[in-house]
Image (cartoon, helix red, strand yellow):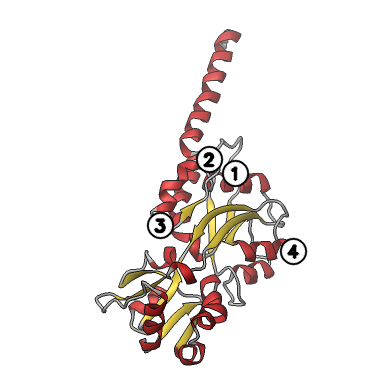
Amino acid sequence: MKAFLPRSALTRRAALAVAASFILAGCAGTPPTTTATGDIHVMTSGGFTAAYNELRPGFERSTGRSVKTAYGASMGNATDSIPSRLGRNEPADVVILARPALDALVAQGKVVAGSQVDLVRSSIGFAVRKGAPKPDIGTVDALKRTLLAAPSIAYSASASGTYYETELLKKLGIEDQVKPKSKRILSERVGAVVARGDAALGLQQVSELLPIEGIDYIGPLPAEVQRVTVFSAGVATASKQPDAARQLIRYLNAPAAAPTIAKTGLEPLSAR
């Protein structure tokens, strides 16, 4: 004969189970999901990659969801750039990239209007091959001398590189001398190019330089010519799981994520 628990015991057990799920999710900085079904697909650009790679496993553990990731530049027509991936209708629930590029995707109908959330501020820096002399870039004049003296310079095909080739060299008044020896890097980290000796000097987001082995980080651009980029997340209009997408964005933007983000060279813009 089947035994039944009293209704009061069932109520207490259900309440304890719900409370436990909220405590677990609270430790991870995000509300719990009611059902963990289907992968969440994320496209992220390089500026936020190091922080994202450290934060993602905690989200997966706390929600029971699997997150699949595609990496690419915020802008440009490289085959693996985020705009190109979306243009091919690759699966995407969340996209993370430079805010101007994200807003352009909203205008194109690729990202849900109003879903944009600013995650971090990112600065541009320089690096040399490990063990090479570190040139002076501490002032604008020193930066000009360093760029003029460098035999070769690598820069990214995304936000930092666009600033370098269209604005920075003009501001410094050295475009004609420096641009011919500068190489725009597609589908690869600038630091990797510098590490193997294919460029003497590399410019990219600080958060993209720091994780690369075989290089020495020199420092950021001087404040007078620095370009800070905000990297933001949004929900793809083609998302099959928009609620889960928003949950992941909240997780990445939670105050609990800030220390992890900061150690990757970014300034967190956590929700308060």
Residue to which mark 2 is pinned:
63
Q: How many marks?
A: 4
Q: Earlier in the sequence, mark 3 or mark 4?
A: 4
Residue 243 pos. (x, y %): 66, 44
For label 4, the SS is helix
For label 3, the SS is loop
Q: Earlier in the sequence, mark 3 or mark 1?
A: 1
Residue 268 in the image: above or below residue 178:
above
Q: Amino acid at mark 3?
A: Thr
Of discs 2 and 4, which sits in the foreground? 4
Left or right? Give the position of 111 relative to 170. Answer: right
Residue to which mark 1 is pinned:
247
Q: Earlier in the sequence, mark 2 or mark 4?
A: 2
Of discs 1 and 2, which sits in the foreground? 1
Q: Amino acid at mark 1?
A: Gln
For label 2, the SS is helix
Residue to which mark 4 is pinned:
107
